[in-house]
Amino acid sequence: MQDKGDIDAMPTNDQLVDMLRLMLVLRVCDEKVAYRKRRMEIPGLLHLGVGEEAVAVGTCAAIESTDKVVSTHRAHGHFLAKGGGAKALLAELYGKETGCCKGKGGSMHLVDLACGFLGANGVVGGGLPLAVGAALAARVLGERFVTVCFFGDGANNQGTFHESLNLATVWNLPVVFVCENNGYGISASLHDQQRVAHVSDRAPGYGLPAEIIDGNDVLAVWRAVSRAAAAARAGKGPLLIECMTYRISGHYEGDPQKYRSVEEVESWKQKDPIARLERVVLERRILSPEQIAAMKAEVEKEMEEAVVFAKQSPFPSDASAHTDVYAQARGGM
Ligand SMILES: Cc1ncc(C[n+]2csc(CCOP(=O)(O)OP(=O)(O)O)c2C)c(N)n1
Ligand SMILES: [Mg+2]
């Protein structure tokens, strides 16, 4: 294993409060998106991340604003946690000009290069080679940024996963692979798809250090990613962190979810990562119950404002239909 740095590192009280607030932002935002989708206001397929907020928030809180993130099809939380902004996200989902991709991308094509969010990706496993490429760019350009690659457990049977792990290790690149292991790829459980129990079981085959953590414990995520990013930045190479978590939302909004039992979902609701951090913040008397209630009201108001902003924003003009399209940017291929 590589040097893990300060194993007792803990976030400050301010960081804990920020993480709690951000997790609430992710939760409330996705709940509002689900509601608006059911009212048929938002087009396209939506993959929500209710229950998985600790992975996105703990990871992005542990890295620097200049670091990069590569995401998946379940990208809203990663986008918000990296600083993408709720208005830009909501407007993008509504297909509006004020969205992060001017309304032309939607849920699975979110990008915000200004905050280091290199992109969501509708192709399962598609982000892994991009993250390795970004890490190689840091090396070639002599820049100190680290790239975090979020990916789901379903991606670990894709060829891109294996090639990316191998190349990152061979070239000792500054990349942290963060697996959101929620136990399912659409309706198929991990155990129905492979004969090794964990995604991280793949790593030793490539000489890649790996660890398994509780992905519903934002402090565990923060600590693991802090150490991994520090090591990667110091030239000690990549690491894989397998975060055990669960999506309370269906695979997509509207999923009938016949592949899992109500009892299973209920048992994971008891392990809610937000309630868990709330308990820590209360026990340590960092915030009072009243302050947490006020924070929730504030987040609720902010997210509602973002919805209104998205709804009131204009659609992109007909005249812009051919701008910001890859083929045209390349000269009309
Ligand atoms: C290359 C490819 N194959 C199949 C799909 C269809 N698909 C969309 S999401 C998904 C499951 C992904 O599971 P996982 O990586 O565990 O992410 P999760 O949805 O659990 O967050 C699949 C198979 C796809 N988008 N891309
Ligand atoms: Mg999964």
Image (spheres, rainbow, N blue to C red):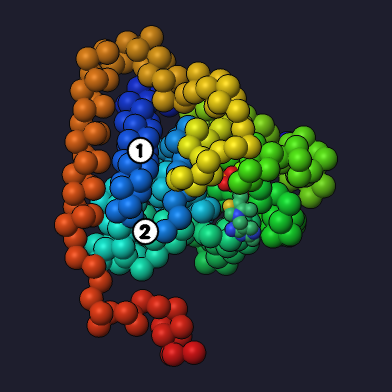
- Taking depth in this image into account, of 258 and 23 the one nearest to the observer is 258
Dot 1: few (<14), some (14–19), or many (≥20) neighbours within 10 Å? some
Q: Secondary structure at mark 1?
A: helix
Residue 79: where, in percent of width, then height? Answer: 40, 50
Q: Are marks 1 and 2 in contact (CB under 8 Å)?
A: no
Local secondary structure at mark 2:
loop
Cα separation, mark 1 vs mark 2, equals 16 Å
Query: Which residue is at 46% across, 45% downward?
Result: 254
Give the residue type that dot 1 points to. Answer: Glu
Q: Is residue 280 left or right of residue 21?
A: right
Q: x, y (%) of residue 215?
A: 56, 31
Q: Is mark 1 within 8 Å of ligand 1?
A: no
Residue designated by label 2: 43
Please tell me whether residue 271 is drawn above or below residue 96 in the rendered image.
above
Taking the image as shown, residue 284 lies to the left or right of residue 59, namely left
Task: Identify which amino acid the numbered label 2 is placed on.
Answer: Pro
Q: Which residue reaches farthest bottom?
A: 332
| Residue on which disc 1 sits | 31
Quadrant of res 8: top right
Q: Residue 48: x and y, percent?
A: 45, 44
| Among the 4 quarters of the image, the one containing residue 95 | bottom left
Task: Give the left or right position of residue 71, taking residue 18 as reference.
Answer: right
| Residue 29 image position (x, y, % from top left) | 33, 41
The crowd level at tag 2 (other Cα within 10 Å; few <14, some 14-19, many 20+) is few
